[in-house]
Image: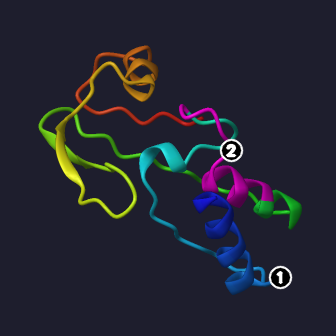
Amino acid sequence: MRLSLLKRTLETRLGMQEQKLVVKVGANHAYKGINPLNNRDIGNFLAERAEGQGHTSLHLIVLAAKGTQLRFTGAGKPYQPAAIELDSSAFKLLASAGRHRRQLVSL
């Protein structure tokens, strides 16, 4: 429901304009195609919208390697600090790319 509202709101504001757009969303929401939450989120919506207009989209994900990050704990509840999950699907993907200090992966 929240995702549907976000998509409708974004589409209404953008209209049919062809414009460059920068959007910051949480990592799970930036995926093209199906994300780790097993849905097609706002990142996929934007990718398909761009493709429908004859354009491409670039999706970047920034991951912390240690420390804590704020986690969503439910509607109306404050975010809570949580340890970085090094066993997440994103880290597994990056681990397969190499063991360098910094890595750029294009998907």
Q: Which residue is mark 1?
A: 16
Mark 2 is on which residue type? Arg
Amino acid carrying mark 1 in the image: Met
Per the image, label 1 sits on a secondary structure element best described as loop
Residue linked to disc 2: 40
Colour scheme of the picture: rainbow
Q: Residues within 10 Å of mark 2 (few under 14, many from 20)?
A: some
Magenta stretch bounds: 36-48
Q: On the picture, is 37 further left or further right than 24? A: right
Tell me the crowding category of disc 1: few under 14, some 14 to 19, or many 20 or more residues within 10 angstroms, Cα based. Answer: few
**What percent of the width, then of the height, locates residue 18?**
77, 80
Element on which disc 2 rests:
loop
Q: Residue at x 66, y 77 (%)?
A: 9
Q: Position of residue 58 (x, y in %)?
A: 60, 54
Query: How far apart are the two marked residues, 1 and 2, measured between alpha carbons?
Result: 21 Å
Q: Going by the picture, which residue comes out furthest to the left?
A: 67
Q: Is residue 10 left or right of residue 17?
A: left
Q: Is 28 included in the stretch rendered in magenta? A: no
On the rendered image, what quadrant is the N terminus found in?
Answer: bottom right
Splitting the image into 4 quarters, where does residue 83 fall? top left
Residue at point 68% right, 44% down? 40
